[in-house]
Amino acid sequence: MILLGQDVSRETIVRLNIYAAVLEKWNPKINLVGKSTIADIWGRHFLDSAQIFREIHEGAGSWADFGSGGGFPGLVVAILAAEKTPELAVTLVESDQRKAAFLRTVARETGIAVQVLDARIEALEPLNVDVVSARALADLTTLVGFAARHLKSTGTALFLKGESWEKELHDAQTSWSFEVERNTSKTDSGAVVLKVWNIRNV
Ligand SMILES: C[S@@+](CC[C@H](N)C(=O)[O-])C[C@H]1O[C@@H](n2cnc3c(N)ncnc32)[C@H](O)[C@@H]1O
């Protein structure tokens, strides 16, 4: 099956179907995603998350997703990585214990090896990873600060951002110096995937 231009195996589709079923079961209790989006888990969440997996650079060995919530984008990345780049180690950081328990449950039921850290990002020792990602977590200035602390010097951050991205980018550039590439989201024409690297204090 083709998932956003990527040919994925039947096993990956089976894993995503298990993920969708567990999400639907847990969502009324712990509000992992907006109720109105649950009918379109594939478009609003799986495809939105899968688009950033294509941005991974060759040789990347470690990826940390911040504020994963229901697992977006990090757990979808981990499921794709299990098939495409099994050497990639994925860490999900989620401070809410119940959401972290959900993430571990999906990982166990799909047979995916991910590390789930139920901690606040600010409290972690530097993770020193090749890639960080986040969706709907914080303003870009804060996210670039998290990336600066947890990325290797050669690393890349991938942030899914909504319509306020231009103002957020302008604001972030007053506190940080970095390279940036903007790509229109494949699932929402008003949103972007921001690729950020070479981060330094201004
Ligand atoms: C709005 S939700 C977004 C969840 C997911 N990334 C998505 O797009 O569906 C933000 C999540 O980040 C978590 N979070 C917020 N601040 C955090 C922090 N400082 N450290 C770790 N997790 C945090 C919250 O518990 C919540 O699950």
Image (cartoon, rainbow, N blue to C red):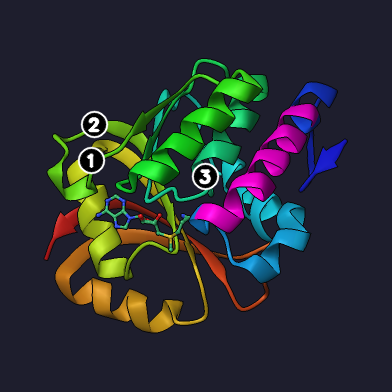
Q: Is residue 150 above or below residue 61?
A: below
Query: Residues under labels 2 and 3: Cα distance?
Result: 21 Å
Write the residue at 37% across / 51% down.
67
Q: Position of residue 54 (x, y in %)?
A: 62, 42
Secondary structure under the numbered disc 1 in the rendered image: helix
> What amino acid type is highlighted by mark number 3?
Gly
Q: Which residues are magenta?
A: 14-29
Write the residue at 50% across / 19% down.
113
Secondary structure under the numbered disc 2 in the rendered image: loop
Q: Which residue is the site of mark 1? A: 150
Query: What residue occupies the far front of the structure in this picture?
Result: 29
Residue 165 in the figure: left or right of residue 2: left
Q: Main secondary structure of the magenta part?
A: helix
Q: Is residue 27 above or below residue 65?
A: below
| Numbered label attached to residue 142 | none
Q: Position of residue 80 (x, y in %)?
A: 64, 31
* Residue 24 part of the magenta-drawn span: yes
Q: Does the numbered disc 3 mark a residue whose Cβ is under 8 Å from ligand 1?
A: yes
Circle 3 crowding by C-alpha within 10 Å: few under 14, some 14–19, many from 20: many
Q: Is residue 145 above or below residue 13?
A: below
Query: Residues under labels 3 and 1: Cα distance?
Result: 19 Å
* Residue 62 part of the magenta-drawn span: no
Q: Nearer the viewer, residue 93 or 9?
A: 93
Answer with the quarter of the image where residue 78 lies: top right
Answer with the quarter of the image where residue 183 lies: bottom right
- Precedes in sequence: disc 2 or disc 3: 3
Query: Residues under labels 2 and 1: Cα distance?
Result: 5 Å
- Asked whether the beta carbons under mark 2 and mark 1 sit within 8 Å of each other, the answer is yes
Q: Which residue is the site of mark 2? A: 128
Q: Give the number of marks.
A: 3
| Numbered label attached to residue 71 | 3
